[in-house]
């Protein structure tokens, strides 16, 4: 079992990575916890035993469940069950569950502790780590949320064996991102070590910039995500999040090359990493550049013109005021 600390002063916590990590839940609960509200989905067939009195709260399946109505419903059910600040929310599932249950925990009674048991690769290497919680609005993804650090995260790699192949592939899209954020050695590692290495990279970034402040360090975790979110918000493409991120990584490399931040060899490296995970690197059929550019201009990072996280001589960093024509050319390069 590998333990990765997330160093955030008095809100520091451990991420436990390895086969069977879910069985260590009781020892990872905050000291003195009396009861646990286990939030999960019917489709998640991973059972956990918190070892204290608990109740299971099911939320609907799918990204549509990640919404304000689900948070309200959860908080109302917590109230009826009598959840208090001495208790804990345990989120068992992928990013939809950890984001939604994490946000409900952040706002219920102005904050109750939450422990994430991440059951998808995507949640293990990204969604469950670092305290970003939130839900979607009809106008876009993740538009309402809070930073609410978990008390602990369990990444049980054994449960990844039963993930549907496309769900696993989606997690690989987030893994691919870490190759450009200090994870150049990732391909040499076993799955457990690789998940732990991704968690360690994310933990270091979060420790340096917990709330995505002025330094822009945390925004680097959104590498590949500006186009990915636009593709997802457009809504009519059959793409999982990580697949969209993979296309976004190659697009970001093409854009960085056009802005003379990286050379052709580095673009090729992006294409090779993405291909090594069997992830897509081309826009879906019929993708409309104007629509995608309009959606990318609405990205939360876009405070001054079109803003992207781009590779460059100083590494990956946010770049504002990017010329629309260059964006259009980079989109054509991934068509
Ligand atoms: N998924 C990006 C972040 O946690 O900051």
Image: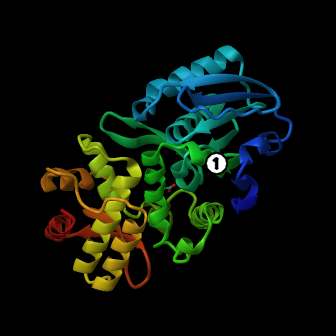
- In this picture, residue 304 sits left or right of residue 32: left
The x and y percentages for residue 257 are: 26, 79
Residue on which disc 1 sits = 149
Residue extending furthest toward the right: 32
What SS does tag 1 mark? Answer: loop
Q: Is residue 60 above or below residue 281?
A: above
Q: Which quarter of the image is occupied by the N terminus?
A: bottom right
Comparing 197 with 143, the one in front is 197
Q: Is residue 287 above or below residue 66?
A: below
The x and y percentages for residue 290 are: 13, 54
Does residue 301 appear in the picture of this structure? no
- Measuring 37% from the left and 57% from the top, which residue is drawn there? 245
Q: Is residue 302 above or below residue 99?
A: below
* Colouring style: rainbow
- Residue 29 location, quadrant: top right
The x and y percentages for residue 134 are: 49, 40
Q: Which quarter of the image is occupied by the C terminus?
A: bottom left
- Measuring 39% from the left and 31% from the top, which residue is drawn there? 64
């Amino acid at each position: 079992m590998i333990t990765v600390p997330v160093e955030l002063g008095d809100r520091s916590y451990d991420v436990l990575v390895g086969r069977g990590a879910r069985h260590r839940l009781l020892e990872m609960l905050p000291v003195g916890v009396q009861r646990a509200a286990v939030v999960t989905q019917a489709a998640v067939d991973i059972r956990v035993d918190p070892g204290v009195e608990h109740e299971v709260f099911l939320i609907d399946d799918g990204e549509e469940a990640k919404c304000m109505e689900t948070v309200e419903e959860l908080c109302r059910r917590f109230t009826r069950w009598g959840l208090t600040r001495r208790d804990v929310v345990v989120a068992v599932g992928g990013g939809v569950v950890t984001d939604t249950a994490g946000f409900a925990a952040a706002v219920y009674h102005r904050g109750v502790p939450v422990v994430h048991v991440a059951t998808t690769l995507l949640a293990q290497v990204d969604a469950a780590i670092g305290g970003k919680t939130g839900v979607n609005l009809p106008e876009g993804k993740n538009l309402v949320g809070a930073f609410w650090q978990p008390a602990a995260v369990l990444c049980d790699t054994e449960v990844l064996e039963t993930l549907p192949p496309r769900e696993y592939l989606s997690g690989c899209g987030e893994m691919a991102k870490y190759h450009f954020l200090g994870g150049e050695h990732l391909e040499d590692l076993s799955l457990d070590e690789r998940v732990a290495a991704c968690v360690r990279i994310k933990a270091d970034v979060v420790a340096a910039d917990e709330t995505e402040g002025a330094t822009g360090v945390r925004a680097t975790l959104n590498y590949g995500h500006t186009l990915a979110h636009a593709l997802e918000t457009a809504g009519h493409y059959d793409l999982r999040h990580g697949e969209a991120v993979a296309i976004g990584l190659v697009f970001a490399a093409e854009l960085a090359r056009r802005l003379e931040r990286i050379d052709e060899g580095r673009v090729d490296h992006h294409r090779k990493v993405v291909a090594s995970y069997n992830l897509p690197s081309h826009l879906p059929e019929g993708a409309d550049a104007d629509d995608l550019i309009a959606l990318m201009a609405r990205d939360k990072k876009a405070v001054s013109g079109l803003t992207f996280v781009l590779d460059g001589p100083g590494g990956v960093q946010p770049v504002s005021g990017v010329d629309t024509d260059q964006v259009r050319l980079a989109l054509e390069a991934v068509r």
